[in-house]
Image (spheres, rainbow, N blue to C red):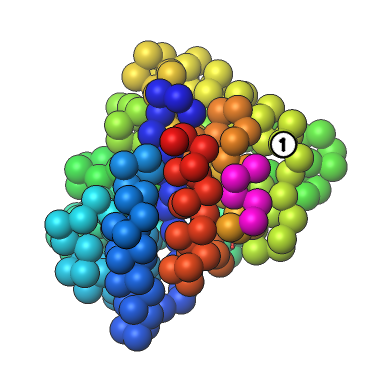
Amino acid sequence: MADIKPLIAGNWKMNGITASLAEVERLREGAAARELSGAVDIMVCPPATLIAAALGLLRNTPITVGAQDCHVKPSGAFTGDLSAPMLADAGARAVIVGHSERRAMHGERDQDVREKAQAVHGAGLQAIICVGETAGERRLGLTLAVIGRQLQGSLPEGATAANCVIAYEPVWAIGTGLTPTAADIAEVHHFIRAELTRLSGSAMAGTTRILYGGSVKPDNAGELLAIAGVNGALVGGASLKADDFLGIIAAVAGLSA
Ligand code: PGA
């Protein structure tokens, strides 16, 4: 990870009410006290209802706020949806797109993910594009084929190392306590970087951050984040408690110290 500053992003999913902002304050205090931001970029992606309030607590800190999804259109008659410009207006700097929960529960296809990533870029934000195989696909030896197809289908025109982050999240590792072997993670991350170079050339080669996600906890973060080609983590459950999230960030900061 020598020349790529790692990113640890917390995906709160559909968790968090006003009282949960106390965790954001604890994160802010803990990261400052332990001087973690020098070594690691930190992002919190709370539900959209809390973006503005979280931002208020994080103003004048290096910790950024992201969103978890957006509509492909900037505005219009789409009851209940939120657009990328709205999320930007609320203070988000990035939007997660193509999370496996959106792909599985909302039928999002690669084409939808690409259009969402385009919308995110159109609003001047960074797209965190998620890819990952299911347990069945891994059993059948299809992991790299699936990830290659998802990347090719989901990467928008104009993708660069600055406006995109890739998150490799094996579906079977999310929320299960299971993680791939170090060799399997290294293989996929190496493959993703090679594919980014093939698909987008020098704009994405070398410096695009490729995160690992799926059951990252304080006690396995050091090991997972030390794997060659892993440039940070997308953290679900363990991002909800500031102490756990700080434990993960500290483990990564220790690696790059
Ligand atoms: P998890 O979720 O850390 O709870 O496994 C990761 C994710 O879905 O981004």
The answer to which quarter of the image holds residue 206 is: top left
Position above or below: 35 against 33: above
Stretch of the chain drawn in magenta: 219-223
Q: Is residue 87 magenta?
A: no
Position above or below: 31 against 229: below
Q: Nearer the viewer, residue 228 or 66?
A: 228
Position above or below: 51 against 159: below
Residue count near mark 1 (Cα–Cα under 10 Å), binned few <14, some 14–19, many ≥20? some
Chief secondary structure of the magenta span? helix
Q: Label 1 sits on what residue type?
A: Ala
User: In this rendering, does residue 120 appear at all?
Assistant: no
Question: Residue at coordinates 20% horizontally, 43% vertically from top-left?
Answer: 124
Question: Residue at coordinates 59% horizontally, 49% vertically from top-left?
Answer: 221
Is 71 left or right of 189, judged from the image as shown?
left
Q: Disc 1 on helix, strand or loop?
A: helix
Q: Position of residue 203 (x, y in %)?
A: 34, 19
Q: Nearer the viewer, residue 201 or 63?
A: 63
Position above or below: 100 against 23: above
Q: Position of residue 91 (x, y in %)?
A: 19, 59
Q: Position of residue 216 (x, y in %)?
A: 60, 54
Question: Residue at coordinates 84% horizontally, 38% vertically from top-left?
Answer: 140
Label 1: which residue?
A: 182
- Residue, far bottom: 19
Is 89 left or right of 163, judged from the image as shown?
left
Q: Quadrant of ligand 1?
A: bottom right
Q: Position of residue 244 (x, y in %)?
A: 52, 65
Question: Residue at coordinates 62% horizontally, 33% vertically from top-left?
Answer: 227
- Residue, far right: 139
Quadrant (top left, top right, bottom left, bottom right) of the C terminus = top left
Q: Is residue 222 magenta?
A: yes
Is 207 left or right of 238, judged from the image as shown?
left
